[in-house]
Image (cartoon, rainbow, N blue to C red):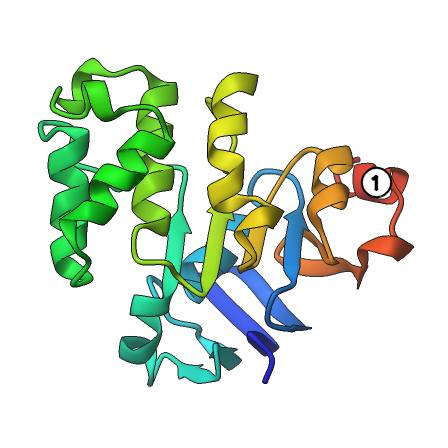
Amino acid sequence: MPALQLEGLVRRYGEREALGGVSLTLEAGQSLVVFGPNGAGKSTLLRVLATLLRPHRGSVRVLGRSLPGEAWAVRGHVGLLAHEPLLYRDLSARENLRFYARLHAVGLARVEELLELVRLRDRGSEPLRTLSRGMVQRVAVARAVLHEPELLLLDEPRANLDPAATALVDPLIGAAARRTRVITSHDPARGLAEADVVLGLRGGEAALLASASEVTPAEIQHLYA
């Protein structure tokens, strides 16, 4: 059973089509990397797959479930890392993760495990607003994988991370995590290295859809021209 099946997905904001008839299939365990300029529809696609936005037209199946009708059955199996960290700034990293642990019925030992993995256990009790952007991003990564989701939706996941922090989170959200992933990226070289399938969006439409082995960095750069 494919992890994702999209047929003619349309999502509008008012009269403007943010996604104009996107179709693709992604098998379980594969990584789809989505390229395109700002405003091309990349984040909108992730929000539809995360059940945060309803499609206006077309068929969307995530992990074998149809959206929006079976969104309730999908949410617990998806981890979203968005541009916004989806964390409470006045709570500590530990309090934030414990909050999400309760939502997902995850034991508190998992919270401490993740704080250790992202090297924030010693600062886990400090309010999030006192931490650097890179540290907050590491907490957001921990939140996204807290419940061991089948599908990871990653919106430019290494933003605000230096090389050392990137090395910390890659075992959680990189290829080693062995999860189905949808990743937005502006980095052709890194994106192609991570991808099984490449989707290039321009103006909400699929200007490029192919196996990563068939795509060159120059084709991706052309999306931004």
Which residue is denoted by mark 1 in the rendering?
Answer: 222
Of 7 and 13, which appears nearest the observer?
Answer: 7
| Residue 189 position within the rendered picture, expressed as x and y whole percent measured from the top left | 78, 34
**Amino acid residing under circle 1:** His
> Above or below — where is 123 with respect to 89?
above
Of 17 and 156, which appears nearest the observer?
Answer: 156
Identify which residue is drawn at 40% across, 37% down. Answer: 83
Q: What element does badge 1 sit on?
A: helix
| Left or right: 4 as drawn, with respect to 106 | right
| Residue 169 position within the rendered picture, expressed as x and y whole percent measured from the top left | 47, 34
Q: Quadrant of the N terminus?
A: bottom right
| Left or right: 216 as drawn, with respect to 24 | right
Q: Quadrant of the C terminus?
A: top right
| Residue 125 position within the rendered picture, expressed as x and y whole percent measured from the top left | 11, 24
| Residue 3 position within the rendered picture, expressed as x and y whole percent measured from the top left | 55, 74
Q: How many marks?
A: 1
The quadrant holding residue 56 is: bottom left
